Image (tube, grey):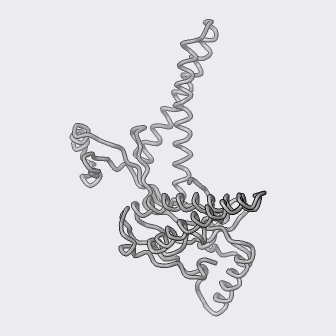
């Protein structure tokens, strides 16, 4: 999920509370930070599966309410109970791995904000040999992936990520425009039309070249064959008005007795969990009740 929310002053204080995030018309709470690429990927996948499952259960519940006959309602109730049991079994595993129940968050608005990513591109042995001729080349930038290898182009963090994403979108749009204008030039029926398209194509190509050079200098991007790998991300969950009110009251009460502490306690960080690992191998701490709001 790509988002550009920002931390901001909330309610009674002018200080920025890094545990709160304003996004659209809601305030989100920082539920957990994950600082491992494999865990981040697995968490995103598991969360999507659990969210879809929860929506399925709620969909059956709505159909039960709308059922006309007793037999229809009975059949739907059995289906809901079976789905709910399956959800709860999977949620128990989810809690062991990530430290909190998916049931607490899937029915609420939530988002994952990437805070650190790295850009990679596949390379072969011939390309690696060429790269090694550059005195600035670092052997550590070549990363093995099974039988293949990838080259680390750059690591992007924080506020630079939305800027990079916008730049990539712009370059992709310009690349598409080049393809479309080239086709239009070839199919032009008159010389005037062909001239006009050709001039427009030249402008787009020039802009594309300039932007591509900028991307190369800024992010090390030298190819369209990019792999974006998330290194760290923050999982945010929307708060109700009552939850936000209670949180702010507790926060301000805590501040009144302290000389420092302009923000809420730093959330715990989920540790590495290899995909497919057994629940007992996970060391992600449980989210405390106050962090669940």
Q: Is residue 260 above or below residue 219?
A: below
Q: Quadrant of the C terminus?
A: bottom right
Front position in the image: 50 or 112:
50
Image point (28%, 52%), residue name: 143
Residue at the far top: name it.
190
Image point (27%, 45%), residue name: 148
Q: Is residue 281 visible?
A: yes
Q: Is residue 25 above or below residue 239?
A: above
Q: Position of residue 114 (x, y in %)?
A: 51, 59
- Is 139 on the left-hand or right-hand side of 36? left
Query: Residue 167 is drawn in which quadrant?
Result: top right
Residue at the far bottom: name it.
257
The image shows a total of numbered marks equal to: 0
Query: Residue 110 is drawn in which quadrant?
Result: bottom right
Q: Is residue 248 above or below residue 259?
A: above
Q: Is residue 4 above or below residue 33?
A: above
Query: Residue 87 is drawn in which quadrant?
Result: bottom right
Q: Position of residue 40 (x, y in %)?
A: 45, 62
Image point (46%, 73%), residue name: 269
């Amino acid at each position: 999920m790509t988002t550009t929310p920002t931390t901001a002053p909330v309610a009674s204080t002018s200080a920025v509370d890094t545990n709160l995030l304003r996004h659209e018309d809601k305030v989100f709470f920082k539920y957990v930070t994950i600082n491992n690429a494999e865990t981040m990927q697995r968490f995103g996948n598991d969360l999507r599966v659990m969210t879809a499952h929860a929506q399925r259960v709620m969909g059956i519940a709505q159909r039960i309410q709308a059922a006309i006959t007793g037999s229809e309602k009975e059949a739907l109730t059995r289906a809901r109970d079976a789905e709910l049991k399956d959800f709860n079994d999977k949620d128990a595993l989810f809690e062991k791995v990530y430290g909190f129940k998916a049931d607490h968050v899937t029915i609420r608005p939530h988002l994952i904000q990437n805070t650190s990513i790295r850009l990679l591109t596949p390379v072969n042995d011939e390309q690696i040999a060429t790269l090694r001729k550059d005195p600035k080349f670092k052997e550590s930038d070549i990363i093995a992936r099974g039988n293949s290898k990838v080259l680390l182009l750059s690591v992007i963090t924080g506020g630079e990520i939305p800027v990079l994403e916008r730049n990539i979108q712009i370059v992709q749009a310009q690349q598409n425009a080049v393809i479309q204008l080239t086709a239009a030039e070839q199919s032009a029926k008159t010389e005037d039309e062909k001239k006009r398209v050709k001039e427009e194509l030249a402008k787009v190509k020039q802009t594309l070249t300039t932007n591509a050079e900028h991307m190369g200098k800024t992010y090390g991007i030298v190819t369209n064959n990019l792999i974006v790998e998330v290194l760290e991300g923050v999982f945010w969950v929307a708060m109700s008005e009552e939850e936000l009110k209670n949180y702010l009251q507790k926060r301000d009460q805590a501040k009144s007795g302290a000389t420092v502490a302009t923000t809420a306690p730093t959330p715990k960080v989920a540790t590495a969990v290899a995909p497919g690992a057994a629940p007992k191998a996970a060391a992600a701490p449980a989210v405390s009740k106050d962090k669940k709001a």
